[in-house]
Amino acid sequence: MFLGNEDILDILYSAEEKALSLGASYAEARFHLLERQGVIARNDAIIGTTLASSRGIAIRVVFKGALGFSSTYSLSKEDVLKAVERAVSQAREASVHMKNQIIFSNEKLGRAKVSVIEKKKIDDLSTEEMINLLMDSWDKIKSADIHSKIPVYMQNLSWSKEYKVIVNSDGGFVESYVPRVFYFFNLVEYNDGNSINKWYEYAASGGSELAEEFVAKGRQYEDVYVLDKILRKAKPSPKGRMDVVLGDEIVGLLAHESSGHPSEADRILGREAAQAGKSFIKPTSIGTRIGSEIVSVVDDPTIPGSNGFFLYDDEAVPARKKYLYKNGVINEYLHNRYTGYLFGKGSNGSARAMDAFSEPIIRMSNTYIEPRDHSLDELIKDIDYGIYMKSYMEWNIDDERWGNRYVGLEAYLIENGEIKDLVKNPVLEATTGEIYSSIDAVGKNLVFHAGTCGKGEPSQGVPVWFGGPPIRIRKVRIL
C-alpha cells in the first residue's frame, strides 16, 4: 500500500507460521513504521530540527498459556524468524510458572485496509515552510499590545506518518496509514516581578493543511492577552464550598484522568499498580453509580480527524464507541482480548502499541464527557456566587484516580449569574465521586484537546484527544 509491502507480508506470514510450528497456540506479527519531521523554535531562534524514522517488526505469541514478546529492527526474514524463536522461548520458559493461563477472547477480526485522507500531503510540509510559520507566529506574538513582557515563546511544529501491517493466526489482517500534525507552544509573560505561562498542544490526524490551522489560527493569540490581564488584574480567589463551572479544557482532562484511566481493565486487575497506578474501580463495579444521571463518559477511536484515530486495534479487533460511564453509572471497561476473555465481555478494540518495540496494551483513544443541552450563559446564570474555571495551570490525581486537584489559570468570579473579576489560581479539590455526583448541568458545545497519554513499563506514549463541554458542579471545595 505505501511500501513495497509484498515482501513485508511474506515475512509477517512466515513469522506467524514459524511460531505455530514451534508449538505456539497463537501468533501475531506487526510491521510498524513511524516517520517524523519537525522544527523547534524559541522566540526568533530556531533551536532544533528533527528528522527521525523508526521501523521494525513485533512478534507476540501464546505458548501453553504464557505470553512471549520480541521485536527486531531488521526486516530480513532470517532476523525476524530469530525474533519469533526468542518470543516462543520466553513463553515456553514462563509457561511452567503460570498459575492462570492467558487465553484470548474469540473475536470476529478485521481484514481491512485503512488510510486517513490528506487534503494536502503530509510530507509536502517542508522544514522551510515550518520555520516560516513559526517565525510569523513569533512576529505576531511579540507585537501584541500588552503591558507585560514576553521573555519566552517556545514552539514545536512537526508531522508524523504511522504505517502498520498486522497479521495473526486467528485470521486478522489490518493495514493502516495515519498521518498526523502536532503543534505545541509555551508562552511565558512577566510583569512587576511576577511571571505566568500557558502551554498547549494541538494534534490531529490529517494532512499538512492542519499546520496553518494550528500555528496561524491558534488560541495563543488570545492567550497572550489573557495572561497579561491575569498578571495585572487577577484578585485573590474566594475559598470555601461554592458552585463551579469548569471549562472544556478541564472537563477533558477530568474525563481522561478520572474516567478513562480507572476504566482500563489491566489497571483494574492490578497490572499497572507498580507502573502507572491503580484504580478505584473494581472488577465487580459494572452497574455502580458514580455520578448524576446527566453524566456520560465516552471513549471513541473512530472519530474522523482525531488524534487518537483508528478503526482496528493492534489485535485486529474492530474499534467502536464505548460508554465508560453511562447516565452516571459505571458501564464498560476498556478491554483487549485477554481481559475481554477474563471478564466474559470480549474485546472492545482497545489494544495499542506505541511502536514496533512495544507490546499492545490497553489504551484510551478519544475520551470525553458527552454534551447535553446547556449554553455557557445558562450554566452561569443560575449561580449566585461561585467560580468559572476556564483553564488550568496544574493538576494532580492520586494513585487510584480518586482524589483530584485542579488549579485554575484563567478563572473568574461569578456573582448573581454574571462573570465578574479574574481571580488568581483557585484550587478545586474533590474526589472523583464527589465531582461527578455534583454535576447538575452539562453544556452542549463539545471541544476536544490533544495530548500524549503515557502508560506501561517500559513507558509508552500514544496520541489521544480528550474533551467535553463546560459543566456545572454544585457546592464543591475551593482552597
Image: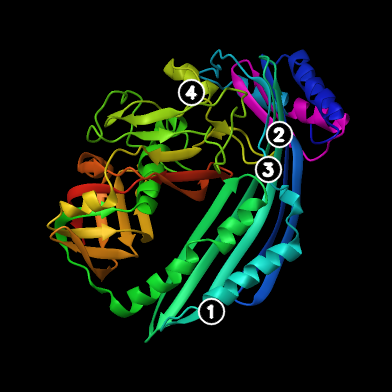
Sequence-wise, the earlier of marks 3 and 1 is: 3
What is the secondary structure assignment of the residue under circle 1?
helix
According to the picture, the residue beneath numbered tag 3 turns out to be 118
Counting other residues with Cα less than 10 Å from the Cα at mark 2, is it few (<14), some (14-19), or many (20 or more)?
many
Colour scheme shown? rainbow
According to the picture, the residue beneath numbered tag 1 turns out to be 142
**Which residue is depicted at the point 62% across and 58% down?**
212
Q: Which mark is residue 164?
A: 2
Nearer to us: label 1 or label 2: 1
Left or right position of 345 against 216: left
Question: Taking the image as drawn, is residue 307 in sight?
Answer: yes
Sequence-wise, the earlier of marks 2 and 3 is: 3
Amino acid on which disc 2 is placed: Lys
**Depth check: 478 or 129 in front?**
129
Sequence-wise, the earlier of marks 1 and 4 is: 1
Left or right position of 57 against 116: right
Q: Eyeballing the image, is 163 above or below 391?
A: above
**Depth check: 476 or 153 in front?**
153
Q: Is residue 83 one of those drawn in magenta?
A: yes
Q: Is residue 209 one of those drawn in magenta?
A: no
The answer to which quarter of the image holds residue 439 is top left
Sequence-wise, the earlier of marks 3 and 4 is: 3
Amino acid on which disc 1 is placed: Lys
Q: Which mark is residue 339?
A: 4
Counting other residues with Cα less than 10 Å from the Cα at mark 1, is it few (<14), some (14-19), or many (20 or more)?
some
Counting other residues with Cα less than 10 Å from the Cα at mark 4, is it few (<14), some (14-19), or many (20 or more)?
many
Q: CA distance from mark 1 to mark 4?
A: 52 Å
